[in-house]
Amino acid sequence: MSNTLYKGTAILTIGLFLSKILGVIYIIPFYSMVGEDNIGLYQYAYIPYNLMLAVAISGAPLAFSKFVSKYNSLGDYETGRRLLKSGLMAMLVTGVLSFLFLYFFAEPLARVTIAEDEEIYSVSDVTEAIQWVSFALIVVPFMSLLRGFFQGYSFMMPTASSQLIEQIVRIIFLLGGAFLVLNVFGGTPKVAIQVAVLSAFVGALGGIVVLYYYWRKKKPEYDHLLASSTESYDVNLKDMYKEILVYAIPVVFLGIANPLFQFVDLLTFNRAMSDAGHSLKTDYLGILNLTAHKLVMIPVMLATGFSMALIPLVTKYFTTNEHKQLSRTLDQTFQILYFLTLPAVVGMTVLATELYHLFYKQSAIGSDILAHYLPVAILFSLFPVTAAILQGINQQKWIILNLLVGLLIKLALNIPLIGLWETNGAIAATIIGYSVAIFMNFAVLVITQNYRSVLLVRRIALITGLNVAMLIAAIVARLLLIQVMPAESKFGAMLIILIVGTIGGLVYGALALRLGIAQKLFGERLTKYTKKFGF
């Protein structure tokens, strides 16, 4: 069972990682097509869409997979199939209703987001972008539930494959559509953005085709299991949906934490900047919430996939009252998270100027916002992991409460801090809000599980020391390099990133291996290889 768990986790992690990497890379050509002055409009559409999508899905796929798995393990395959039929219909209904709501309320939402005298985008620009992306809501909930059904059979390949194909189809349509609008049909960048946001709908259709392929392939096997059901519990679907809803709501809040914080910026940033007399000729919000945010999420991807592989163990040890093992698992989770995320954040912060140039263009404003925003990646990694642990120890209600407290703090501080420090104020409000939510998650863990770890504190201090050494090496290497090869071109920027990144990585890796912390975190397999190199 353990091998199945880790194999499934690995498949999902690899699929998600590849999908997210593509989601970062495509922004480079897209940015060059539509330009800095228009790219932010893309995000104005996607943040409301992500929130509405969360409402449409309501965490149902994860809850659905849990119940399918539960009744399959009892030999009752009939209940899972009945739930599939009713669930798909429910997702279709919620998807259509969500689409209608977002489509027809796009204009009021746009008016709340920006002022009539906005210097960069008009109300109609934002309205049309939101309306075009809303079509995806018809398809995506339906697709997500199918993924949940396959996961209930511990079959993770359809989810990973469909996520990847969905992303590939979306990006091909997005870049191809934008290119045709701008270079063949002579359209404006804002029309190209509208075509680009429609790609969410087209990509979802690609994902559904993949899931249909797997359904056709596995249906004979599932029909055989259905025919050989040893038990039928004749579960009342109404009661089951109530239970699904209770389980799903914390999952929804976990999934939309980041979009909710971005939505606060969307509602308040431009007005706060305008009221404080700051210039809005540059799309600061577009840089903060899209171009910089895409790069900030890279360290989060690197760490969370590895850490989340340990989360199922939390549920197991909690259920069997193995408190010592639970504490050890939590120690390992937080150490791996910090060990992987911090060096990525430190290295990217040192290279923020070159990274922004490589992905987008030379921009003092863009690289400055990126450098200040990158440390938030540590919090973006910590919150979902601490929240997932609370789910594992059956404390789901605290996820909602803690997130809402953090969100209210962000909302309360955003306008005054933006007035004081512009984009840095929005970043500061996010840091404070997330920090409070994470602190409260830890507090629940300490109170309910009596979790205290001197080892964790010592290891965090050690990892921090390693990163200080890496930081010094990276800064010195970069300063020497820019003297001899200024990064005027993208190739020059890439060269500096590769050289400085390699030096920093070697310093960090060598010290971690020499002190033995890498071996302690990643086990005997790593030790087998490192012994050959004298570590």
Image (cartoon, helix red, strand yellow):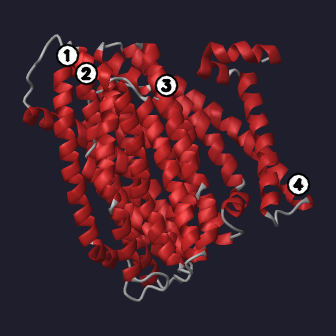
The disc placed on residue 223 is 2
Q: Which residue is mark 4?
A: 480
The location of residue 220, given as percent across then percent down, is 31, 22
The disc placed on residue 35 is none
Residue, x 16% and y 38% (percent of image)?
A: 86
Viewer-nearest of discs 3 and 2? 2
The location of residue 360, given as percent across then percent down, is 66, 64
Q: Is residue 110 above or below residue 71?
A: below
Say what amino acid the circle numbered 4 marks. Leu
Distance between the Cα atoms at labels 2 and 1?
A: 6 Å
As helix, strand or loop, the secondary structure at mark 3 comes to helix
How many C-alpha atoms fall within 10 Å of the one at disc 3: few (<14), some, or many (≥20)?
many
Marks 1,4: beta carbons within 8 A = no
Viewer-nearest of discs 1 and 3? 1
Distance between the Cα atoms at labels 3 and 4?
A: 39 Å
Residue, x 38% and y 72% (percent of image)?
A: 268
Residue, x 36% and y 16% (percent of image)?
A: 323
Is residue 156 among the parts visible in the rendering?
yes
